[in-house]
Image (spheres, coloured by chain):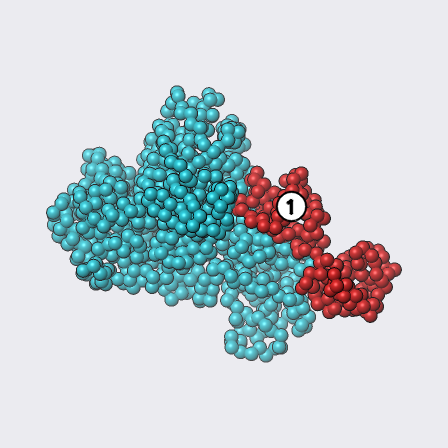
Amino acid sequence: MAKLTINGREVEAPDGAPLVEVIKNAGIFISNLCYVDGLPPYAGCRTCVVEIEGMRGVQLACTTRVADGMVVRTDGEEAKRMRQAALSLIMSYHSDRCLTCHRIVKCKPGDTCLRDGVVTHRCLTCSKNYRCELQTTCEMLEMAGYEPWEGEERTYYTTPQPEPDRANPFLEFDPQMCIICTRCVRVCDEVRHTGAITLAGRFNPRIEFGAGGPVHESNCDFCGSCIDVCPTATLMEHPNKWAAMQTERWVPTACTWCSVGCSIFLGIKGGRGVIVKPDTAGNPFSRDQLCVRGRFHYDFVRPHQRLQRPLLLRDGARQEVSWEEALEYAASRLAEIREAHGPQAIGFLGSPLMTNEENYLLAKLARAVVGSPNLDSTAGPVARAALEAVREAFGTPVLPADLTRVPKARTLLVVAEDLESSHNVASVRVKDAVIREGARLIVVSPRYGELCDFATVWLQPRPGQEAAVLVSLLRSLARDGGAAPGLPEALPDPEPEGVEAGELARAADILREAVRDQSWRPLAFVYALPYLAPEHVRATAAALCGLAVLCLGDEAPSCLYVLPQEANVWGMLDVGVAPDLLPGYREAGSPADQGDMERLWGTPVAGGPGSDVWHMLQDAGGRLRALVVMGDNPLFFLPDRQRVEEALARLEFLCVIDSLDTATARLAHLVLPDSGPYSKEGTTTSADRRVLRLHVAASPAGESRPAWAILRDLSLRLAQRLGLGEVRLNYARVAEVMDELAEVVTLYRHARYQELDNGSQQSWDGLSPRAARVPTLRLPANGHGDGHLLLTSRGLYTSYEAAALGLEDADRLHREESLEMNPADAAALGIGPGDLVRVANDRGELVLPAKLTYGAAQGTVHLPLHYRGGAALSLFGPGEPAASVRLSRA
Amino acid sequence: MGLTSRHSSRFTPIDFIADDTGLVARVQALLDDVEPDRAQMLEALHRIQHELGYVPKEAIPFLAAKFKTTPAMIYGVLTFYSEIRTEPPPRVEVQWCSGPACLLKGSRNIRLALEAEFGCGMNESAPDGALGLRLVQCDGTCHLAPLVRLNGRYIGPLTVTDAIQLARRLKEEARRA
């Protein structure tokens, strides 16, 4: 640490830290218009000049590194004059003359400017007024009245100004506001590794996107990081641009559109979210990064498009009813069915889109109140398959992996179908490792994702053969005499289709080197779970665990990262929404664990293993008579659409708790409106098991209530009817649910809200890895028929909420509304770019335009999962990682 | 500022480029023996411009894949060098010298006259693409100042009258051709 003096104040800072950051962190104002924290200095704006004792003249604070004993003054006369001079040069090119005007406080937007006739742009009519860094800098440097440029002398007036680009739905780019600080260029390049923005030209430098066209035609993925660093109104959010000027408060909460769990601030105006910015002090993994989903999807479904009041199906039509009537109806129907057919006739579906508290109350309602173990979620089978492999390998279902270690890794193996789209910020961190640490990256993916561009080796197997690739790697490493507990004598010898032997050998060499040579460590294994095919997921997860164990031995569990798709998959399992798990990973069917739960809840608990989602649907109308669905949407997330729909129609009573009128809700007998992700209190659990707080930010739509309150009221009414005695079901606040959860689930022991708000983390007691062994390796059969293989995975741009409602602009950029196919396949079928293609098999058919890309391997085509309300899955059979389809020109 | 680095060993861009004009195929053939090394980027641009007269925008995705970077980074390089064109050159191009000797002898008036006659700005082509103006640097032929270059010939010293007559003659020739 260095001790230095800034403006007479003693400050401590790490040796060699950039002086400008130290000054800012000390709470002293220093103008800096081109510096970006954490990036190398650019020294373009020259406004951060300071005086340092013992040095001649003035110094730039951004290029100066602190040293012990440094005496710095930011308030000297000379430095001040130089700053003003530098800023006046910058301003000569900026459109706003208000910035240097002494009258600005007296002006109103409708006033005529009294100074001169050439004022075209005015701060007063700019959407960044009073949240503009350039404006603040001008105020702080006392630029009012500082005017070396007479009237039209300013270069701004002698240069023709480019037109603003407002053609895309997210980002407004108005180059005439630009002061060429190049912060956006550097952030896009060095922080995001996207490289969509460039400094073009030399005599008249300017910022341009892509190959000089509109923003949406470049490779910009609309993460919005450039907006965060832009000191002017050049780069702005398009949605709610004006409303966001009047943000009333910033609510810290978490993004729930994938399992990374980025921490965000939601800006609220009039009870509605109007702007999102990253909460840099929240989740240390996401820090200051978000993706297009986190930044812009808050706005895809407006409050009036959410469910407002309970809906009851009466005489074939849905009617709005009061809460009283709806809850009474639900309780009486459930009680009747329980009476007539037994508790097992009622099933429950929880959801990874809902909070831990809500899933926990659903589990309690199922097992303690109704007494039914039939409890699952559409995301359950895949997640439990991965969990099973992890548990076999390490003796615990919970991996202690901390994602913040990923950007420091030196060797990475990523198994994901396009991590860029499914877990965008995780993908940025993997790229960080590659670019900043020089890490080697192996990507195993049947399809191109942007991460493949950063890979040292990209292994592209046929769909469903990821496990085979990993087993081949395992085999190759085991041949060197590597030993690990559980490693079978005779490993299977698969020959993954589509992967060249040479590439496979190169990947094995990279891993081998990481095992031998400490300088290629840390090693990280990342697996982004798909939506489909639990059997394949189990095989892939097992092979990956095995590979990690062989490479790292006991260290393996802390270097293995399993990322589920949806936000709260792990939390949902933690609190016991699973047919074979009780809360806290107590085992269903174990009398000891059942007794434990009965003691904690003070009531008999249905402890046996129940039916999973597929068995429930199979039994629908027979053994299963009623289904309570909370936040889940089987008609969106499950394959074999036809059969699911028939099963749901056979139910005597389908009750849906959701904030959206989803396809499943439209079939329901009773719909209870939940208030949606931005209007409720609770917690979700990220991929690396950070417990993240959600706060009430927006006002709930209509009479909707948070699902935890709905479940509470329903449980209370049901308990009364069933004459249930001691069980606690009444919670005044959701915090009380978490207090109880902290008692029941070890992981959440320190997750009481008060503790969370003080920065506490999860507790691993009794859940630490107990072993590290290679789990059983079973390779699933790949019995695909002829024709092409259809893959589906989550796209980056389509909003789940809007897609679930079937809104036309669920993908506002229209980047994910086509079938990706290989140009060679297309040529063979006579299909050109943009031609309509018919994709068909026995289950159904879809017609949509083709997009030709080498990213799809020959013989495979790809369709985003969220396209047209999840239409792709209607072509899939259960358990299939890819569907066989016939293609033809439509 | 660094160029965004991509590792990939693919030399074809991931998205299919409809190459109706065959331009991209020509560019691809031209660069067959150019190493995919950043140091060779200018060599590649020179070759393309030498062969086609300009670097077509359609070639940018291909160049980005070749040099393992993004289209924006290629575009940044392209626009940095004023000698590299991104539009097809006009059939006849008048090169106006912007050197100090010419300026002192009143070349600005010649520029204005040429721009007015051709109906296009500096470094632009007239709407029909037949005639165009280009700003060039001094190459030491200052005894002819103020001058323009036409097909490698130096024309000067010019008066404004000469410039207008020259422009009219070129327009007439272009019309007849």
Q: Residue at x 73, y 62 (%)?
A: B131
Q: Residue placed farthest to the right in the image?
A: B143
In the image, A353 versus B134, the foreground residue is B134
Count of marks overlaid on the render: 1
Q: Position of residue B14 (x, y in %)?
A: 53, 44
Residue A643 falls in image quadrant: top left
Relative to A883, is B156 on the left or the right? right
Question: Chain coloured cyan: which letter?
Answer: A
Q: Secondary structure at mark 1?
A: helix
Residue A416 falls in image quadrant: top left
Vertical position of residue A383 compared to residue B133: above or below: above
Question: Chain coloured red: which letter?
Answer: B
Write down the residue under mark 1: B26
Q: Residue at x 22, y 62 (%)?
A: A319
The amino acid beneath tag 1 is Arg
Rate crowding at label 1 as few (under 14), some (14 to 19) or many (20 or more) other CA atoms within 10 Å.
Answer: some
Relative to A264, is B101 on the left or the right? right
Q: Position of residue A482 (x, y in %)?
A: 45, 23
Q: Quadrant of the N terminus of chain A?
A: top right
In the image, A300 versus A822, the foreground residue is A822
Q: Residue at x 38, y 45 (%)?
A: A840
In the image, A429 versus A499, the foreground residue is A499
Vertical position of residue A215 compared to residue B17: above or below: below
Determine the chain carrying the residue at label 1: B
Relative to A358, is B30 on the left or the right? right
Q: Position of residue A878 (x, y in %)?
A: 32, 40
Query: Can residue A806 be seen by looking at this rendering?
Result: yes
Q: Position of residue A714 (x, y in %)?
A: 20, 54
